[in-house]
Amino acid sequence: MKAILVGVEYDHMYYDLDISMNELRDLSEACHIEVKDVVIQKLSLISPKYYIGKGKVEELKHMLDEDDIVIFNEELTPLQVKNLTDALDVEVTDRSDLILRIFESRAQTKEAKLQVEIAKNQYLLPRLAGMKEELYSQQGGSGFRGSGEKQIELDRRIIHRELIQAKRELAAIVKQRQTQRQLRIRNQEKVVCLVGYTNSGKSSLLNYFTDKKVFQEDMLFASLQTASRQVKLKNHHRIIMSDTVGFINQLPHHLVQAFRSTLEEVKEADLLVHVIDSSSPYCDLQIETTLNVLEALGVKDTPMLFVYNKVDQDRYAFLQPKEPAVFISVKEKINLDLLEDKIIELLFKDYELIELYIPYDKGEVYSQVKQAYEMIKEEYLEDGIYLSFYIDRKQIHKYQDYIYKSIN
Ligand SMILES: Nc1nc2c(ncn2[C@@H]2O[C@H](COP(=O)(O)OP(=O)(O)OP(=O)(O)O)[C@@H](O)[C@H]2O)c(=O)[nH]1
Ligand SMILES: [Mg+2]
């Protein structure tokens, strides 16, 4: 199977076509589809009927072999899929579908699998009517072969039922995560989320901070599940650091919706560490895309640190960095210490060192403190325990009665 990629340059488009077509090629390759040609058309408006102009459809038809596939750079409407499939008589698909396929092949946890299934079925449902039978079964249809409208209606109902079921299962998992999160909030743990474009180095950075490694790889969408790790920083500061799914331009709407729950974490973070591939020629656009997806998720006002990664590639000199920024290389371990300082500065600026003296009969206070904070010093004295640790100034009043008064 070989692919012809099709893109349209139209008035007022919101992305750069060249960049986007290159990315479509990467996405195809990630799906193990070889690209044999790229077709670009300039139009003032997208055609509602065929996406491209009628003449271009004819031209395309002549370029096709029997088992080729045509991949459009934007999500086609169900009507366009149907018309194009009828006219071209080969498999017709789009960017969203490729992204969904990649997500599907990468999903490992139950949660990620459910999320992808939901997104895929929502994408598939309105497009059923336009699909050719064999294509539909390839895409993991209901398994019932047959043709005609009756069959499609039947399949539609099955998919619909599956969707409801998957959403229910997902909701249960999400609820469980929420409970865990609330526990953390009660424990006062600060949460840092690594966000950014796919392949920017988020997982690599998390792996630098922890021994419990996550998957990192030079490919699009290596990580689909949020991985959270407890990380100890300098000065006994303890945080939770979470790696998240990478973003890409024109991320399918259904996918963003389905991954909302995974990304809830991002909404509740105390700090977003925005990891950027400074070696990419499209660096600025990737930053914009990430910021736009975050906005679509309802994330605003969360402090953000811009981390320009891969400076070992020496492309960063041309950048106009956003502030506050740190330039690092995870691979060559450049400026990682500085990054850690910056994270501490942003997260713990309201923290100060306190010393407590908790009498032995106040065991509950002692265990509360021990659970919530990382101790710098702990000493067993005659009538009680001496503790020193960093704490948010706003929380000090809770322990006012136990402030350690030195004898001198
Ligand atoms: N040259 C260079 N490569 C790096 C650096 N940091 C990470 N990489 C490489 O970039 C690729 C992507 O790294 P990941 O950590 O998997 O990226 P990610 O942001 O988690 O990607 P997704 O999970 O797809 O969103 C890997 O091949 C890394 O080895 C760096 O500082 N310099
Ligand atoms: Mg990753």
Image: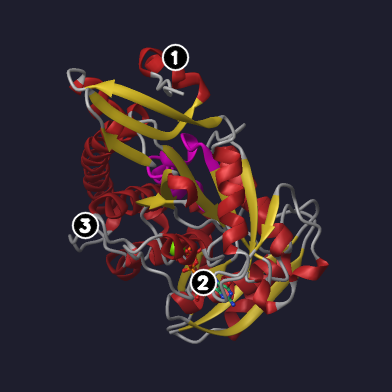
Way the structure is coloured: secondary structure
Q: Is residue 76 visible?
A: no
Label 3 to label 2, Cα distance in Å? 26 Å
Name the residue located 58 percent from the left edge and 60 percent from the top edge. 337
Is 250 contained in the magenta span? yes
Q: Do the residues under discs 1 and 3 have CB atoms within 8 angstroms?
A: no
Where is residue 15 shown, x and y percent of the image?
71, 57
Of circles 1 and 2, the one toward us is 1
Of circles 1 and 3, the one toward us is 1
Amino acid under label 1?
His
Where is residue 123 shown, x and y percent of the image?
41, 51
- The residue closer to the viewer here, 315 or 386, is 386
How many numbered marks are there? Answer: 3
Label 1 to label 3, Cα distance in Å? 61 Å
Outermost residue to the front? 408
Q: Which mark is residue 27?
A: 2
- The residue closer to the viewer here, 56 or 36, is 36
| Crowd around label 2: few <14 · some 14–19 · many ≥20 (10 Å) | many
For mark 1, what is the residue? 397
For mark 3, what is the residue? 142
Name the residue located 79 percent from the left edge and 51 percent from the top edge. 12
Label 2's element? helix
- The residue closer to the viewer here, 244 or 247, is 244
In the rendered structure, which segment of residues is drawn in magenta?
A: 249-271
Amino acid under label 3?
Ser
Quadrant of res 272: top right
Q: Is residue 363 above or below residue 245?
A: above
Label 3's element? loop
Where is residue 240 shown, x and y percent of the image?
40, 45
Q: In the shown orientation, is residue 390 left or right of residue 261?
A: right
Q: Earlier in the sequence, mark 1 or mark 3?
A: 3
